[in-house]
Image (cartoon, grey):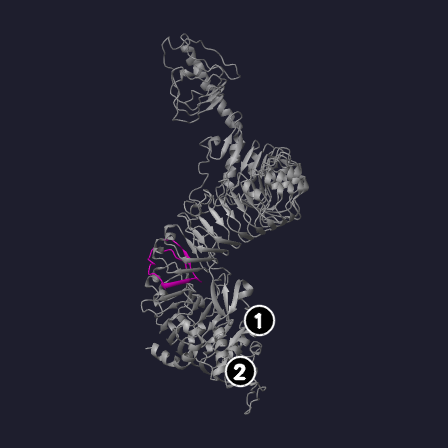
Amino acid sequence: MFARLKNLEFLWLRRNLNVMLPNNGNCSFPRLKELSLHGFNLTEFPYSLSSLEELEWLDISRDKINEVSTKGEEEGKKETEPFTGSSPAIPYPGRRAKMRLLVLLFLLLHLHIHLSSAAAAGHLPELRGLLSIKSSLVFDPVSEQPPLGWWNSSVSHCLWSGVTCSPRTGHVTALDLSGLNISCPVPPQISSLTALSYLNLSDNFFNESFPAQLAVLKNLQVLDLYNNNMSGPLPFIVTQMSALRHLHLGGNFFNGSIPPEYGQWEFLEYLGVQGNELSGAIPPEIGNLTKLKELYVGYNNIYEGGLPLQIGNLLELVRLDAASCGLSGEIPIEIGKLQKLDTLFLHMNSLSGPLTRELGQLSSLKSMDLSENMLSGEIPESFSQLKNLTLLCMFRNKLHGSIPDFIGDLPQLEVLQLWENNFTGSIPVGLGENGKLQFLDLSSNKLTGTLPPDLCMFRGVINEIPLPPRLKVLSLSNNQFSGQLPIVFFRNSNVELVDLANNNFDGPLPIPSPNVWFYSAANNKFSGDIPHQLCNATLLRVVILSNNSLNGSIPHCFINLSASVLDLRANKLVGHIPDIFFSWNNLRTIQLSQNQLEGTLPRSLANCKNLEVLDLSDNELEGRFPNRLGTLPNLQVLNLRSNKLRGLINSSRKNNHPFPKLHIFDLSDNSFCGHLPAKYIANFIAIKDESRSSLQYMGANDTHATWPPYQDSVTVVMKGFAIKLVRILTVFTTIDFSRNFFGGDIPELIGDLKALKGLNFSHNNLTGKIPSSVGNLTNLEWLDLSSNKLNGEIPRGLADLSWLCWLNLSDNQFVGPIPQSTQFDTFDHSFDGNPGLCGHPLPKACGVDNPQSPPPTSPEDGEKKAQGGNWIKWKAVAMGYGCGISFGISAGYVMLETRRSKWLVRTVERWLVGRDRKTNRPKKKCGSKKSREALIHDRFCTLTCDFIRMKKCV
C-alpha cells in the first residue's frame, strides 16, 4: 500500500493494529527518516527495515518483541551499520551478528523505558495541569456521560482526546475542548501548558471574562473562543500573544470597543469579533494587519461611523464580513485596492450614497451582499468587470434606473437579488444565458415589459420555452410585467419556487413544474380554468392563485397535492367544493372566499385536523351550519360571511368542547335563526384567555412554515368598516353574527369572553336586556347591538369599559338614562332610535315630559333618517373610529385594504330607492346574493322577510 511513496520522510503508525508491514526486505522508503511503531503489537523484529538507510529515529515502544528469529544466510547479507543521527544505532541482522543484535536490542529497549520514564517525570506539571483543568470544568446537565471520562493517569496524557503533544519534545501543544457543553469560567490552569500553540474552546457555555493568567501562552498561534457566554470588554491580554495567527472571539457577549492594540499582530491572518455587543468606531489600526486574510466584525455589534479608510491596506484580505453592525456613511473607495477579496458582506447597515465604482476593481470577488442599506443611484458600469461574481445581493436599497444589460453577461452569476428597489425598465436581455443562474428575485420594483427570451432560454417556439436549467427560485412579484406566459413555461425545469404575484400577466395560467413547492400567481389577470396538470406538482405546499379571473370548478385532482395552503379567493370559480379532504391532508389554510361556489360544505372538511384558517365567505353556499367543524382542534379563523346558510345552530352532542382555539368567528349576512349558540360561546377557550398578550402573527411559530412565508389574511367588519387584516395577530378576537335572524336573549355567559376585542350582533331579532356580564369584557374595543329588539336599561358596566372606542346601540327599545362617562360622551349617534332613552348625548333630558325638539330638518333630511338609519350609524362609526383601535392597529394590525362594508353600500342603495317610494326603511334583507344586490328585489324582500324567517326556522 505504500509502494508509491518514494519521497516519504516521516511515517507514524502508532497503535495501528490493522496495518501489516512487509517482512520480505521490500520496504522501499529510500528517504524515510522517522518511523513510529509505538503500540503496533509487534512480536518480532521486521527485517524489512534493513533497507531504510536514511532512518534516523525509530520508536518501537509498547511492542512485544521477545526474540529475533533465525534467518537463513540468504536473507542477511548486509552487515550492521550505525545510524547517522544522534540516537543509538539499531543494528540489523546480518549473518554474523545474530547474538550481537539480541544484546543490543535488549539494551535499546531498556534505555527506551528509562528515557520514557524520565520524560514523563519531566512533563508531570502538564499532566497535573490537565487533571486540574478537568476537575474545574462543569458540564451541562444534559450530557449523558462526562465527556472527559477517559482523562486519567492510567494512560499517557498525550493519548487523551483533545490533547496533542509534540513528537519531538512531548510537550502539550494543542488543546481542543470544543463542543463539550462546558458551563463555567475558562480555567486559568490552562496557563500551565506553556507550550500551547493551539487552544480551541468554541461552542461551549464558558462564561465570565477571559482569565489574565493565559497571557503567559506566548507560543499560542490559534485561540478560538467562538460561541460561548463570555462577557466583559474584549480581552486585552491577547495582545501579548505576539505569535497569534488566528483569533476568534465571536458569538459572545463582549462589550466596549475594539482596542487599537488589536492592530499590532504581525502574523495575524484571521480576526473574528462578530456577534458581540461592541460599540465605538472600528479602529483605523486594523489597517496595520497586513497579513490578515479574513476579517469578521459584524452581527449584533453597533459601531459608530463606517469602515475606516485604512481598510484598503489589507491587501491580503480574502473575506470581509461587516454585516448588521450599524455602519453608516459611504463605502470607502479604498476598498477597491483589495484585489484578493472574494467575499464582501456589508448588508443590514445604514450605508448611504452611491455605489462606488471602485467596487468594480475587485476582480477576484465572488460574493457581494450590500442589501438592506440606504444606497442610492444606479449600478455603475464598472460592475461589468466582476467576471467571477456568483452572488450579487443589493435588495432593500434605494437604487434606481434600469438593470444594466451587462448583468446578464456575468458568466458565473448564480444568485441575483435586487428586490425592493426602484428599478425600472425591463429585465436584461441576456439574463440566464450563462446557464448557471439558480436564484433570481427582482420583486417589488417597477419593472415592465415581458420576460426576456434568454431568461426563458428561447428556442423559437413559444410553447417550448423552458427556464434556465439550474434555476431554483424565480420571484418577479410586485412589478408591472405584462403579457402572456406560455402554458408550459415551467415544463422540464428544475424551478422549485415561483412567485408571479401582483403583475399584469394575462392569458391561461402557466403549469408549474413537478418540482415546484411554492406557486403564487395572485393578483394578475390570468383567466380560464385551473389546469388539471397543476396536480402533477405533487410537492406543492403553497398554492396562491387569488385575485385573478379564473373560472370553472376546483379540480378534484387537488387530492394528490400535499399542500398546506390553498388560496383561490377572489376569482370566478363555480360549482361545488369537492369532497376531497381526506385524513392524510396537511392543509393549514383554505381560502375560497369571493367566488361563486354553491352547494353544501363538504363533510370531509372535518378531516383537516391541521386546519387553522377556513374562509368561505362571499359565495353562494347553502345548507345548515357545519357543526362537525367544531372537532377541528387547531381552527382559529372561521369565516362564513355572506352566504345562503340557514337554520338553527346546534352543536354536536359528541363534542363537548367545540372550537377550542377559535378567535375569529364570522357568520354574518346569512339566514341563521333560533337562539345564539350558547354552547359554542361557552367553549371559546381562546377568547376567554386574556393572558395571551404576546404579539405573534398566525403561522409565525409554525414548524412547517414555508419560505417565503405565507401571510394569513382575512377581511372583518371592524367598527363599521370592512378591513382586510393582511396579517392576523393571535390576540385579535372578534365574533360577528350580524344580519341573521337570531332571536331570544343574549346569553349571560357572553361575559366570560374576557379577551374579546369586537362583538357584533346587529340586525337580528334579539330581545331582552343586555346582560350585566358585558361589564366583564374589559378588552372590548367595539360593540354593535343595533337594529334588534333589546329593551331595559343600558347596564352601567358598559360605561366603565376603558378600551371601548366604538358603540352602536341604535334602533332598539332601550329605556332610562344613558350612563355617563368620558367614553360615552363621544358616542354621538350610538343611541338613536331608542325613544325611551334620555340624557346626554341625546337631546331628551331625563325627567322632562316634553323633550327638546331636535332642530328642524328638510324633507329630504327626514327621508334620510327614515330610510337610512344605518347612514346615521355610519356617521357614528366615523366619529368613533377617530379614537382608533387602541390595542389592535397601534400594536401591529397591518391593514392594506379599507373599504365600505357591503351593508353600508346596500343601505345607501335602499335609501336611494326609498326616496322614490316614500316607504319605511326595509327590514332584514333576504334572498340570494344576486337578488340582494338588485334594487328592485329589495322591495320584494321588505314584504316577505318575516315570512321566510319563520319558514326557515322549522
N-terminal label among 2 and 1: 2
Residue range corresponding to the magenta coloring: 561-589
Crowding at dot 1, Cα within 10 Å, few <14 / some 14-19 / many 20+, comes out as few
Which one is in front, 914 or 876? 914
Magenta stretch, main secondary structure, is: loop
Confirm whether the magenta stretch covers residue 85. Answer: no
Amino acid bearing label 1: Cys
Q: Position of residue 611 (x, y in %)?
A: 39, 60
Give the SS element for disc 1: loop
Please give the label number shown on residue 883. Answer: 1
Determine the residue positioned at 64% across, 39% down.
336
Amino acid bearing label 2: Ile
The answer to whether 652 appears left or right of 457 in the picture is left
Q: Say above or below: 620 vs 344.
A: below
Give the Cα distance between marks 2 and 1.
21 Å
Q: Say above or below: 698 vs 815.
A: above
Residue at which label 2 appears: 818
Q: Say above or below: 536 vs 866.
A: above
Q: Position of residue 388 (x, y in %)?
A: 55, 37
Crowding at dot 2, Cα within 10 Å, few <14 / some 14-19 / many 20+, comes out as many
